Image (cartoon, grey):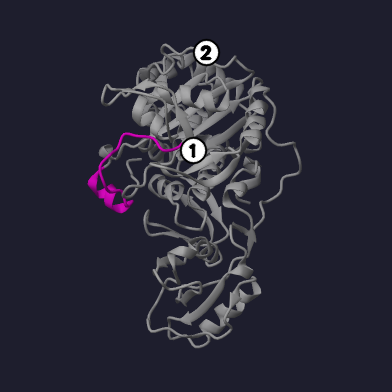
Amino acid sequence: MPYAPPPRRRPRWAMRAATTLSVVVLASAGIGHAVVSSLDADITRIDPFRDMKNRPPTGHGMNVLLVGTDGRDRISEQERQRYRLGGQPCHCTDTMMIVHLSQDRERASVVSLPRDSYVDLPAHLDRNTGRQHPPHPVKLNAAYAEGGPALTVSTVESMTRLKIDHYLEVDFTAFMRTVDVLGGVQICTAVPMKDTYTGLDLAAGVHTLTGGQALQYVRSRHVDGASDFGRMKRQQLFLAALIERATSSRVLLNPMKFRDVTRAVLGSVRADQGFHTDELLDLGRAMRNFSPSSSEFTTVPVAQASFPVKGLGSTVKWDPAQADRLFRTLRDDRPLAARRPARRPDAATAVEIPPQRIRVQVENGTDTAGLARRVDTALAAAGFATTKAPVDARQRGVTRTLVFYDPRWDRSARSLAAALPGSELRAVPGQGATLRVVAGSGFRQVRQVRVRTVAQDSTEVVRGDQVACD
């Protein structure tokens, strides 16, 4: 599973969550204690709970903080190029998840914590410089950069009032290797997905992703207008699919396959000193009947997806009341969503700006007669304020549909791009309020959109069986 992410884009920790959770799930095979014990030595031990005081009280069930780190230095140059991974390894984290396993081990609740979440760090010693820092505001991912696992755990506990029982830090290379050992993981998409940054290029339909392709899928943040929130949603969908793959395949019944998977995972894992063989086996036996319907996924509720802070830029501000309710539900060991018949999420994509407020000029960038008229009509039917006067573009031979926009109207541009699957955004300072769409030969359809912030959309709770492929 030696693969990697692109320049400046760091691995998203859904992969890491998936990897670690797969270890737990695979232990349900009932493989002997001796086999798992022999692999336990591969785990690097750390002590993230050292000298921690005034911790939240212990709740019901188990809370695991999953943290993903960059490990591109362990990936071959050929794989770096193939999967668009550039730059230097940062050995940092920018994504985290809390996985709550219910006391009866019949349910897993996964909560994504946005990497740019606003937080006030307490006074602490900087692990890199050795200097004492006074209390100061940061983005959540800075907790690991400044204070490592210990500061990360204490920060998350302070924000959530949840006691973290175990800490697992996974290198994304383990995630890729695990996907490959499992024979790939199946995902489905109703629309094409293309991201030039990661190299992701999927047609609409069902796909079985290899480790490297899976990495591209969970890292991509330029396939729609939802940026990090859309990326977190895809990470959750992939984690549900990986759980389904691990629990439905014969991996659990094949000792050699089980050994290969655990070796792939454990070789890149760092865990707290209390997470050992016995914990893996106990969890595995308890989760023998675990399935996608037993899992539920959400993102912490957000009040402001772009909260400006001097010196930090744009941060994500949690909704204190809703976040408190969410974490209280976990403390009480209750499901995040009431049981109801499984339904597919709304096919319409959430956007921030209503289509009616977005003026669009459509141009034909191909030699296909009538293409601009077809795109104009489809956009108008979706609610966009088109000029109803499509023209031929100066550019010819355009393949990927282009959306040109003035940066002052960037939210409108993201909303329009969300309606044009596979389109590419291009900023043109001074263009004005009217957005230009140059239709390419790759145009297939206009996707319906609905007015809702992507932050709100990401906080919906979905079960694993609601997002699995048919």
Residue 362, image x, y percentages = 51, 79
Q: Could you say which quadrant of the image residue 100 lies in?
A: top right
Q: Residues within 10 Å of mark 1 (few under 14, many from 20)?
A: many
Residue 387, image x, y percentages = 57, 81
How far separated are the C-alphas under marks 2 and 1?
A: 23 Å
Between 58 and 273, the one lying in front of the other is: 58
Taking the spot 62% from the left edge, 64% from the top edge, the residue there is 354
Q: Name the residue type under label 1.
A: Ser
Q: Earlier in the sequence, mark 2 or mark 1?
A: 2
Residue 355, image x, y percentages = 61, 67
Quarter that holds the N terminus:
top left
Question: Was residue 377 drawn as part of the magenta stretch in this picture?
Answer: no
Question: Was residue 80 drawn as part of the magenta stretch in this picture?
Answer: yes
Q: Is residue 405 visible?
A: yes
**Residue interval drawn in magenta:** 76-95
Query: Is 63 located above or below residue 294 in the figure?
Result: above
Between 178 and 408, the one lying in front of the other is: 408
- Disc ID at residue 448: none
- Disc ID at residue 54: 2
Between 113 and 344, the one lying in front of the other is: 113
Chief SS of the magenta region: loop
Q: Is residue 27 visible?
A: no
Q: Name the residue type under label 2.
A: Asn
Secondary element type, mark 1: loop
Taking the spot 30% from the left edge, 23% from the top edge, the residue there is 127
Taking the spot 62% from the left edge, 41% from the top edge, the residue there is 464
Taking the spot 74% from the left edge, 36% from the top edge, the residue there is 338
Give the residue pinned by disc 1. 117
Q: Residues within 10 Å of mark 2 (few under 14, many from 20)?
A: few
In the picture as drawn, the residue positioned furthest to the front comes out as: 310
Between 314 and 329, the one lying in front of the other is: 314
